[in-house]
Image: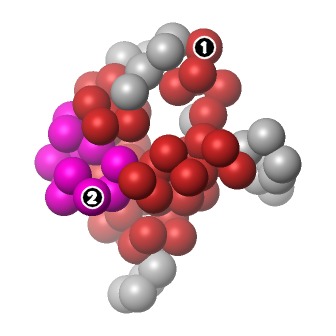
Amino acid sequence: MTEKDLGKILKEMHDKAEEGFESTNILLFGIEFAQIILKQNYKPTNIVRASGLHPSYSIELRKGVKLSKFVRPI
């Protein structure tokens, strides 16, 4: 899976989020895809850029990746 592929999924998750929960879905994306992101040494800024979302979402994505060490998606 490439950064471009991840960007597409990130955009879909963002767009499907209920109003006011967009950042939450970015965090969940980071948790769900952390292993791929870390294994491939992908940069959150590149994934967010590929998604076309505002660059500030890279902060939320980083938080989600870090949280993945402590939580697992259901």
Identify which residue is drawn at 41% across, 87% down.
Answer: 20
Residue 4 in the image, given as x and y percentages of width and height: 27, 26
Percent x, y of residue 60: 45, 57
Picture quadrant where residue 33 is located: top right
Is 66 in front, or is 74? 66
38 with respect to 70 (left or right): left
- Which badge, 2 or 1, comes first in the chain's sequence? 1
Q: Is residue 16 magenta?
A: no
Q: Residue at x 72, y 44 (%)?
A: 68
Q: Is residue 55 magenta?
A: yes
Closest to the camera, between mark 2 and mark 1, is 2
* Region of the chain picked out in magenta, as a range: 48-58
Query: According to the image, label 1 marks what residue?
Result: 39
Badge 1: few (under 14), some or many (20 or more) residues near its Cα, within 10 Å? few
Residue that badge 2 annotates:
56
| Residue 30 image label | none
Q: Is residue 33 above or below residue 1?
A: below
